[in-house]
Image (cartoon, rainbow, N blue to C red):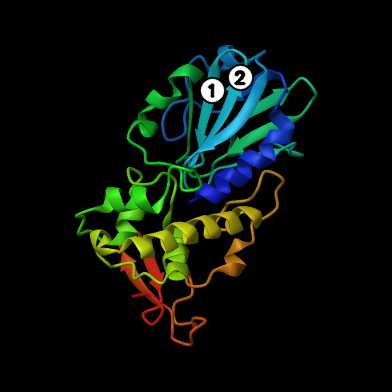
Amino acid sequence: MPELPEVETTVRGLRPVLKGAQIVRLLLRRADLRRPFPADIGQRLTGAVVTGLGRRAKYGLIDTDRGDTMIFHLGMSGRWRVDPSETLPHDHLVLTTASGRTLALNDPRRFGSVDLIETATIDRYAPFIAMGPEPLGSAFTADYLGTALAGRAAPIKAMLLDQRIVGGLGNIYVCEALHMAGIAPSLAAGQIATTRLRRLVESIRIVLAAAIEAGGSTLRDYARPDGELGYFSKQWLVYGREGEPCSCGALVERQPEGGRSTFWCRKCQR
């Protein structure tokens, strides 16, 4: 699933194409993804000028001069294709700008979503209401994390994946950040000292920044809007490396957890 770095990479790839551009055509090639497209999305966006692009957690934001924001989620396999040479079967939403640029939202599994809301009400958008701070934002600090985790017996990994604690973290980057911070994923969240939380916050920021710089990680169908594949997977220290040596010499372990796995080093992480 595309995580925060992949969405940030996507937004950065769309920005030079869409910012300041007028949308002259919006074509829906099916009625829905995970849920139906907004019924009036074509009417509200045709003729609109894109005033800015941003991201909240794993959601991309496209603002327009009509006071509307299109919010997209890439689901499991979604990606935007810029100026495609042909229309593919899973290009479900296609935008055309006044300058002749084309952007296609491709989602083979259709677990993504597109919503259109008034920009002024974005804080009341249902997924954002109870969402925690951005992990790259100034509000995400060791003091905040200590308060949010106080008294919590749940494992620190589970708490970091809880979008109410911090918005946008996913399995890959939590595994990598916990390894960098030297914290065992199963450690009770409320028992972690402030000094270790500072290191954890720093590690989360470093891992996410490096992943964004690398264009994200290539998993299944994810690619950047220009079609290039992210290469942060080449920098993984533990994720996906079960049985391989950690930098300390011990072997990386994997703990299955339902539909996902935790990768960690027993020697480095305590």
Residue 147: where, in percent of width, then height?
28, 49
Task: Specify the amino acid type for callout 2.
Answer: Thr
Q: Nearer the viewer, residue 6 or 131?
A: 131
Estimate how packed mark 1 is, as few (under 14), some (14 to 19) or many (20 or more) residues with alpha carbons within 10 Å. many
Residue 182: where, in percent of width, then height?
41, 72
Residue 250 visible in the snapshot? yes
Mark 1 or 2, nearer chain start: 2
> Which residue was labeled with disc 1?
69
Q: Quadrant of residue 68?
A: top right
Residue 112: where, in percent of width, then height?
47, 38
Q: Which residue is at a point 68% across and 33% down the rendered structure image?
A: 103
Residue farthest bottom in this picture: 249
Q: Which residue is at a point 41% across and 65% down the rendered structure image?
A: 178
Mark 1 near mark 2, Cβ–Cβ under 8 Å?
yes
Secondary structure of the residue carrying tag 1 is: strand
Residue 207: where, in percent of width, then height?
53, 60
Q: Nearer the viewer, residue 163 or 38?
A: 163
Residue 155 horizontal side relative to residue 122, left or right: left
Q: CA distance from mark 1 to mark 2?
A: 6 Å
Identify the disc placed on residue 64: 2
Identify the disc placed on residue 92: none
Q: Quadrant of residue 270?
A: bottom left
Secondary structure of the residue carrying tag 2 is: strand
Q: Which residue is at a point 73% across and 32% down the rendered structure image?
A: 17
Task: Specify the amino acid type for callout 1.
Answer: Thr
Q: Nearer the viewer, residue 26 or 142?
A: 142
Q: How many badges with numbers are in the image?
A: 2
Estimate how packed mark 2 is, as few (under 14), some (14 to 19) or many (20 or more) residues with alpha carbons within 10 Å. many
Q: Which residue is at a point 72% across and 45% down the rendered structure image?
A: 226
